[in-house]
Amino acid sequence: MNNIALDKKLMFIALKEAKRGIPYVYPNPAVGCVIYDGSKILSTGYHKKFGENHAEHEAIKNLDEMVKGLTMYVSLEPCTHTGKTGACFDLIDPEVFDRVVIAEKDPNSEASGSIEKLKKRGIKVDLGLLKHEARKLNKRFYVFHEKKRPYVILKYASTLDGFIAQENGYSKWITNEKSRKENHFTRSICDAILIGSNTARIDNPDLGSHGCGRDPKIVLIDFDNALGSLDLFKKKPIVYSSPELSNDAGKNINFIMNDLYKKNIQSLLVEGGAKTISNFLNFEIFDELHCYVAPKFLGKGLNIFQGENSIEKNYNLELVDTKMIGDDLKIVYKKSYT
Amino acid sequence: MNNIALDKKLMFIALKEAKRGIPYVYPNPAVGCVIYDGSKILSTGYHKKFGENHAEHEAIKNLDEMVKGLTMYVSLEPCTHTGKTGACFDLIDPEVFDRVVIAEKDPNSEASGSIEKLKKRGIKVDLGLLKHEARKLNKRFYVFHEKKRPYVILKYASTLDGFIAQENGYSKWITNEKSRKENHFTRSICDAILIGSNTARIDNPDLGSHGCGRDPKIVLIDFDNALGSLDLFKKKPIVYSSPELSNDAGKNINFIMNDLYKKNIQSLLVEGGAKTISNFLNFEIFDELHCYVAPKFLGKGLNIFQGENSIEKNYNLELVDTKMIGDDLKIVYKKSYT
């Protein structure tokens, strides 16, 4: 095995270790670490739970003895901030470690900066090995810190001809019970869930995870300050209204994204309705699209997309998964950033 | 193994044999046969090619010697007509066969009737074992003979919001090249392909299988006898026009289906446009639906479904398959007959 293949193999092991921490490390990223002496793996470690040791700390702790000339493989740049557990950077002793291989930089400016510091200590640093895989593992974390907004999932349920409700607004239920259950699970793994004024007023939905896990924080657009009497308000939602919101949908989305970022909301499920979903689509503020398609045709009603595009309009949607749920189909797209 | 489990096992082998004849036996059904002596399989056989021996003939031919007390498992009722190869019924000698197990009756009235005749000869007949599987194997054949119309596949390509063309009619290309290739293959395994007047006039499509296999016969609705100058006419299509056609879409479809049945068209691919597909949907004259969905939103244009339903309207569409084709998605539904 050549050096690159060996490096890759060891970084894959670090990534596999990292995965073991999901979802317990949230809102931290999942990180794994491997320590290698040039002929064999001496130890591994991963960040197990939020507030507990980081991966590097675990791997070093698992070493039988400190010897010279070791290489560390770690799926994220070691942190420099003391936080809850002390800086990982301080644990990487140049008397022990000759080389540190890092998959990807830490996008969190409060924690990053160790690469230059390690180099100054005389440690060789290689950055970028299996970067794509490392980013995928912590995609929500990267979007949150790099784009300074939550990771956004748009979700809707429509007929084959694109309708989410009849002309009279009636929409219960287009998809089957299992499809709705599938989405309750998605709710349980998102920090917050957002709906627009019309959906709140017409559907007055529950927005909970229905026993699938924790309930997301509710985010409500109450444009005209007119929804205060709804049951949803008992759940203490984050509410955005005029005059914070204007008639400029793009500005409104950016304002909300920025505010949710400040509120430390790392992931947001947008559940409609058509106007809200369309605004997120039009301004291309989203990372995933979950379409639940029922084997129905309505012909008339409320179409999911309130806008107008040519056939050439490209949202850079990458089809990543489908799931047959009875006769409903869940289609998952990922936004490719261009 | 009890008797039922043993019967099933042997019929499964007959069905597996049958499959070997697909697609060479067309327009005949695929049939397989197993001969069993009570402790072991003595021979198997299947219908290999149109015009050649039927499955029963092959299995009997493959016997080393004729002995008493045999059971025949055959996936379709043995034929009674002489056709190209002589009646299979005549080969089933009551001196040799005590029992014949048949998965399903022959829906072709010209060939059926052997069950009663076998019984009269003193042979025990069991009918209906793995009937569902046997019907599935020859679904086009059953629809053709039982419903006296072709097996109909509706195919369209749309955006996620249900549009098949822009408002100006422009629709090339909503889906990607590989999706179109996938559909060219479907064309190659259908006897005929049908389009309506508008699609012919606007798209003037080729409708061939583009090297995937044989080209289907073209069936054209030329309502006003106005399309004679199109290139398609060089391919000698079957054309339906007024006054054969009236303003009653239901009557028109039934007329066309009946005529194609008489013309021995066993399978028909309907490729649109919206009006034509919607008529077949509305009158529920179809067996499969192939939706090719592109990751696009148009917002305005020609929607695939020209009609009006409530959410409760149930087409009894069973989701049977999906195929990811790049970022396009092919969704296959089967019509469940209620």
Image (cartoon, coloured by chain):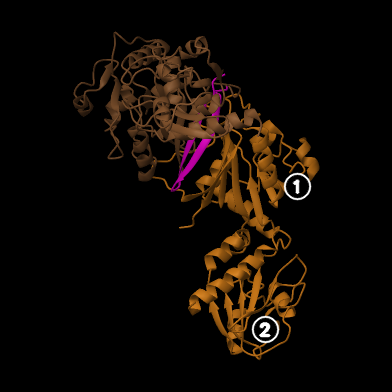
Chain colours: A brown, B orange
Look at the image and give the residue range highlighted in magenta: A314-338
Tell whether position A266 is magenta: no
Relative vertical location of residue B231 with respect to residue B300 in this rendering, above or below = below
User: x, y percentage for residue A71?
Assistant: 53, 25
Classify residue A261 by image quadrant: top left
Residue A173 position in % (x across, y down): 35, 40
Q: Main secondary structure of the magenta part?
A: strand
Camera-nearest residue between B222 and B306:
B306
Type of amino acid under label 1 = Asp
Disc 1, SS? loop
Secondary element at tag 2: loop
Between label 1 and label 2, give the one nearer the viewer.
2
Q: Amino acid at mark 2?
A: Ile
Residue B194 is tagged as none
How many marks are shown on the rendered structure?
Answer: 2
| Quarter placement of the C terminus of chain A | top right
Q: Quadrant of residue B329?
A: top right
Relative to B156, does residue A259 appear above or below in the rendering?
A: above
| A285 relative to B252 in the view: left or right | left
Residue at image mark 2 = B92
Sequence-wise, the earlier of marks 1 and 2 is 2
Question: Closer to the camera, B36 or B275?
Answer: B36
x then y, percent, for residue B309? 43, 41
Q: Which x, y percent locates residue B176?
A: 64, 32
Mark 1 Cα shell of 10 Å, populated few (<14), some (14-19), many (≥20):
many
Q: Chain of mark 1?
A: B
Which residue bears the numbered disc 1?
B215
